[in-house]
Amino acid sequence: MIKQLIILFYFLTGVMTPSISIALVIGSDQEEIYIDANFSGEELLVFGAFYSDPSQSRDSKSDILIEVVGPPEDVALRKKDSYFGFWLNSKSVTFRDVPGFYYLSSTSELADEFLINNQIGLLEKKKSQMIDWSLLTTDWGSIINEKEKEEFYNALIRTKQNDSLYKQVSDEIEIIDGNLFRSYIDIPNTVPVGEYTVNLHLIIDNEISQEYSYNFMVTRVGIEEAIYSFSKNYPFFYGLISLIIAIIIGWSGAEIFKRFRRI
Amino acid sequence: MSIYLPIAELSVNIFLLLSLGGVVGFLSGMFGLGGGFLMTPLLIFIGIPTNVAVATSANQIVASSISGTLGHWRQGLVDFKMGGVLLIGAFFGSILGVWIFSRLVAIGQIDTVISILYFALLTGIGLSMLIESSKVIRDRIRRKNVKRKIHYHNWAHRLPFKVRFYKSKLYISVIPPIIIGFVIGILSATMGIGGAFILIPAMIYFLGMPTSKVIGTSLFQIIFITALVTILHATTTFAVDAVLAFFLILSSVIGAQVGVLAANKLRGEEIRALLAIIVLGVATKIALDLLVEPNEIFNLSVIRLVF
């Protein structure tokens, strides 16, 4: 079931400054992603249109920026060290409320300054230093050194990127006819469940001219949801049922094949 | 075609799972082993989280040991009394094992500890199988018939609390079987194995049980340990993945039956030597993962509030 979500967002500043009139129209093909037995990741389609007033200067540079932020989660980041030739986990840092998924794309590469000023993006090293990490509750454990902290910040982003859960690109938005845009965002099969926020920005001359946000949910459904919640709510009976299944299959397997062998 | 595993929270190829279960089942049917010692590391290799691999493996072993026990039971080769005494130890051992396991998960050392334990176990199994099978092959070439001692008398016979085990024709203290059960319980809970590989030699050499009763009794005992471990993991670490278990059980039960048929047709020692080499290969892979500097020295895990 695909729900159409079309929101018209008019930003008419006509009264104040009659010379500028821009509209951002956003559509998304889905407000929910369902994790069922066949789930192997999905593509989220974000599309829309933007209209700029013809009277606007042709020289101004306009960009579309799409940001997808997943539900917050707590993560433990561990660093391996070599002990007598063995690579074992040693130092560990706990980050609280980091986004479980983060995606940022824009129609052209945006200046670092812009991203920093608007507190967007957390992927690259330069930017990660600028993010207000103090907002994150972090349990540093034995780590006190600033340089080491930075190493952990970068590793957090890198490991998330390696799992395809964090991504920052500038070539995934398709522009059609100069005013329509479309983007397919890869949602990998390891995404956390919960509420996701999609933020869209229309940027003109390095200034955010329009903003629009909407949410969608990633939810488990059907048997996946039933098994998951049963295992959390009734762990003993869940274990028992797993056992009974094992006993039935084990027993009947032996019986069935015994008959085969007699023939 | 892939299937989403609700507890592991990822999707895997269904044919990969079925063939993994089938191959491990085949080997276990052929050699009369539980197969947990191969199942757990192979699950980890295909990307299943360590805790889910261990807990789900225990669940799968319940099915394969039931299949195996039935045959031995019908032939009267299960010493229930001995099995029961072993279980007393195993009960406490597996509770301790699951507790150790959840502590290791909490401090983030579970992967390393599991790797080291598996490396030690697989190297031991692989080498002993290789030595044993090559000896048999050599003896066969020299047309020698080696007679083996059936009964051992050692310290286990001198301890107090002696009990008569009629079926095994033994009169020994209950302390050694309880200790053996306890150790197997710990290993079963932390590694997701039945422990037959350690249990069988321990029963023969420490307890002096007759070889004919050993396999049936150990299988019988393993059903209950792994059943207990499954319940304990389901309730404390929440890592038993019923969907993963279902596909592994289905394919391993079929694989095991095919393995039993194949065992009757093929010569044991050569295949045993081959299995030894596979086991050593898996051990080598685990060792390399520990010894070679990883590409990424950081690893991230989501903290789930389950404890």
Image (cartoon, coloured by chain):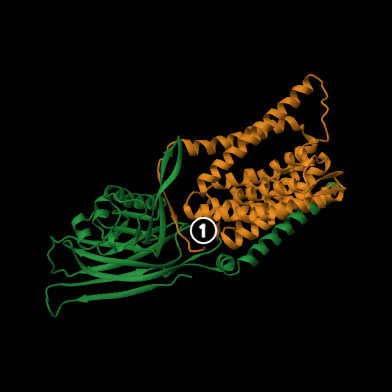
Q: Residue B117, image x and y in percent?
A: 57, 42
Q: Residue A126, image x and y in percent?
A: 24, 51
Q: Residue B125, image x and y in percent?
A: 65, 36
Q: Is residue A3 left or right of residue B248?
A: left
Q: Which quadrant of the figure has residue B94? A: bottom right
User: Along the line of sight, which residue is nearer the eye, B126 or A169?
Assistant: B126
Q: Is residue B262 left or right of residue A137?
A: right
For disc 1, the neighbor class at 10 Å (few under 14, some 14 to 19, many from 20) is some
**Residue visible at 67% across and 30% down in the picture:** B130
User: Along the line of sight, which residue is nearer the eye, A39 or B264?
Assistant: B264
Above or below: residue B246 compared with residue A16? above
Q: Residue B223, image x and y in percent?
A: 73, 53
The chain letter for the residue carrying disc 1 is B
**Residue visible at 25% across and 64% down in the picture:** A179
Q: Which residue is mark 1?
A: B9
Looking at the rendered structure, the number of numbered marks drawn on it comes to 1
User: Along the line of sight, which residue is nearer the eye, A236 or A127?
Assistant: A236
Q: Which quadrant of the figure has residue B276? A: top right
**Residue visible at 63% across and 32% down in the picture:** B277
Looking at this view, name the residue that lies furthest to the top: B142
Instruction: Chain B: give its colour.
Output: orange
Q: Is residue B242 left or right of residue B199?
A: left
Instruction: Chain A: give its colour.
Output: green
One can see residue B93 in this view = yes
Amino acid residing under circle 1: Glu
